[in-house]
Image (tube, rainbow, N blue to C red):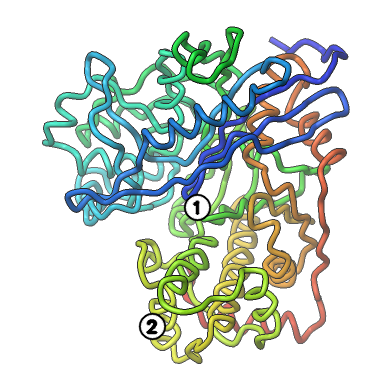
């Protein structure tokens, strides 16, 4: 059924709960026919905790941050029209028959899934698994996490499994559901039919009845419970709207594209680079190139490759903070801009960079192993990371075009990395295409725009993107396309093995 035409009205206030790997935030947007403003109400840390050898999320601390944020969002202002939650993918919480949480959710960077994928492929070969689900290999996929949990008392006692945004929605509303875009990342769904892959689950011993019914972006997700209203000081019944709860799905929804011929790079802790398609690509060539088919809004497919992203730099900064005096990030990027380009590059998708720890040492080891100059200073390591990320972006954009038989004329960079001017320019140079950077808070904006659409303020994602393009600050970076630059990127590409 077509959505109703937007009705002019005063700006609405929407709250976006946007959870990242290192912090969470509650953002408040004012949205009207030609208005889209976003303001941070509250930001809080997301600090994983290692207990008894297992890395876990401190989910109660995150929930407390959400309540504090909703309280801040409601102080002295008009009522909230709606609330939505987006966050990271693949991780989950288990509930018992009484709805109680069975332990803090395990972090996707925990080592419990080591070797599990090979076990799964012994039953369902990797080629069959990709043909069924379209999801690229990553050791932390929900499928492998559930296989690692098989035989545990915790899983045996579980009545429900909720992905992280769905778990927090349940605590706010008391309503159970499984949001579609996040469910598509589990490696347990058929991305063409938008339904669970029962054959895969049965063969691998996964109980799909643990997942509550699927909800789609824009569906109602309940209202804030009375005790939540008391805890937050919100005075009126407030609806919670299902948004694209995988933060990447929300970020892609907020790409301010004015043409269909675009690639996107969602930059932050991870870089997710690819295309928006109308159907999945599940060829063997696509599997070998490690592309994934995750669902987006309006029946779209996010055809993308996961790249380690600014996690590499974040972990370096964390290491340097504990060992030496470190310049500010701004100063570090300024110094890195003067380091010779492409002096050393590494494979930004190498699983060796996945765990936390001494990242500068691992980068130095990777350069040494490939007979490249080893970075000796903070600035040289930073430049190595940014050159390597730009190179990975180039490969992903080129490979996606080839595999999808599509041509793009612009690359949109959204998310926190869009603020990194050096990374944006290097990506333009590497891809040989213009880069449009912004918005930085793409996930939160995609979150509120889906809520606004559910209220009838917008018709479709094209109107959402037009509103973004007309209201958000964007920066365009033109590539340096002279022959010497192109040759330098080609030579650097040969130093790093293909994915």
Q: How many marks?
A: 2
Q: Secondary structure at mark 2?
A: helix
Q: Is residue 288 above or below residue 367?
A: above
Q: Is residue 488 above or below residue 27?
A: below
Query: Mark 2 and mark 1 in contact (Cβ < 8 Å)?
Result: no
In space, the residues marked 1 and 2 are separated at their CA atoms by 27 Å
- Tell me the residue that label 2 is attached to: 365
Mark 2 is surrounded, within 10 Å at the Cα level, by few (under 14), some (14 to 19) or many (20 or more) other residues, namely some
Q: Position of residue 378 (x, y in %)?
A: 54, 81
Residue 293 visible in the shown view: no
Mark 1 is surrounded, within 10 Å at the Cα level, by few (under 14), some (14 to 19) or many (20 or more) other residues, namely many
Q: Is residue 453 above or below residue 443?
A: above
Q: Quadrant of residue 218?
A: top right
Describe residue 387's horizontal placement relative to residue 113 as left or right.
right
Q: Secondary structure at mark 1?
A: loop
Question: Which one is closest to the eye, mark 1 or mark 2?
Answer: 2
Give residue 291's mark: 1
Q: Nearer the viewer, residue 300 or 423?
A: 423
- The residue at 81%/51% (across/down) is 474
Q: Position of residue 145 (x, y in %)?
A: 27, 43
Describe residue 494's horizontal placement relative to residue 143 as left or right.
right
Q: Quadrant of the N terminus?
A: top right
Describe residue 161's horizontal placement relative to residue 426 as left or right.
left
Give residue 466's mark: none
- The residue at 67%/67% (across/down) is 423
Q: Nearer the viewer, residue 28 or 348?
A: 28
Q: Nearer the viewer, residue 461 or 38?
A: 38
Describe residue 386's horizontal placement relative to residue 58 as left or right.
right
Q: Quadrant of residue 239?
A: top right
Q: Position of residue 351 (x, y in %)?
A: 37, 64
- The residue at 13%/36% (across/down) is 152
- The residue at 66%/88% (across/down) is 340
């Amino acid at each position: 059924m077509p959505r109703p035409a937007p009705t002019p009205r005063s700006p609405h206030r929407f709250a976006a709960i946007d959870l990242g790997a290192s912090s969470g935030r509650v953002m408040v947007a004012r949205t009207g026919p030609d208005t889209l403003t976003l303001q941070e109400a509250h930001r809080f840390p997301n600090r994983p905790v290692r207990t008894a050898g297992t890395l876990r999320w401190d989910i109660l601390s995150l929930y407390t941050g959400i309540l504090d944020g909703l309280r801040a969002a409601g102080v002295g202002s008009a009522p909230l029209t709606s609330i939505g939650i987006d966050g990271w993918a693949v991780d989950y919480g288990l509930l018992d028959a009484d709805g109680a949480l069975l332990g803090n959710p395990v972090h996707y960077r925990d080592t419990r899934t080591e070797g599990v994928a090979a076990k799964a492929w012994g039953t369902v070969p990797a080629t069959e698994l990709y043909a069924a689900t379209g999801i690229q290999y990553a050791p932390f996929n929900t499928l492998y996490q559930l296989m690692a949990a098989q035989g545990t008392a915790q899983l045996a006692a579980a009545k429900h499994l909720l992905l992280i945004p769905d778990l927090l929605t349940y605590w706010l509303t008391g309503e159970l559901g499984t949001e579609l875009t996040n469910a598509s990342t589990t490696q347990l769904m058929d991305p063409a039919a938008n339904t669970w892959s029962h054959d895969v689950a049965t063969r691998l011993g996964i109980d799909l009845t643990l997942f509550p019914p699927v909800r789609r972006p824009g569906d109602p997700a309940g209202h804030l419970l009375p005790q939540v209203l008391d805890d937050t000081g919100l005075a009126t019944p407030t609806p919670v709207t299902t948004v694209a709860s995988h933060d990447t799905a929300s970020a892609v929804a907020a790409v301010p594209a004015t043409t269909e011929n675009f690639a996107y790079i969602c930059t932050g802790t991870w870089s997710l680079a690819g295309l928006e398609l109308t159907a999945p690509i599940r060829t063997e060539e696509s599997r070998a190139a490690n592309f994934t088919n995750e669902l987006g809004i309006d029946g779209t497919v996010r055809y993308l490759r996961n790249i380690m992203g600014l996690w590499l730099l974040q972990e370096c900064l964390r290491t340097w903070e504990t060992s030496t005096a470190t310049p500010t990030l701004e100063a570090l990027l300024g110094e890195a801009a003067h380091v010779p380009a492409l002096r050393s590059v590494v494979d930004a998708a190498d699983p060796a960079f996945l765990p936390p720890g001494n990242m500068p040492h691992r980068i130095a080891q990777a350069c040494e192993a490939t007979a490249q100059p080893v970075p000796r200073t903070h600035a040289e390591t930073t430049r190595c990371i940014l050159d390597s990320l730009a190179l990975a972006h180039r490969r992903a954009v080129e490979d996606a075009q080839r595999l999808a038989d599509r041509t793009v004329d612009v690359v949109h960079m959204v998310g926190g990395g869009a603020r990194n001017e050096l990374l944006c320019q290097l990506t333009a140079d590497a891809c040989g295409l213009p880069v449009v950077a912004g918005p930085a808070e793409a996930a939160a904006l995609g979150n509120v725009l889906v809520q606004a659409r559910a209220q009838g303020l917008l018709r479709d994602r094209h109107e959402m993107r037009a509103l973004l393009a007309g209201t958000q600050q964007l920066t365009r970076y033109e590539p340096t396309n002279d022959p010497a630059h192109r040759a330098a990127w080609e030579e650097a590409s040969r130093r790093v093995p293909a994915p």
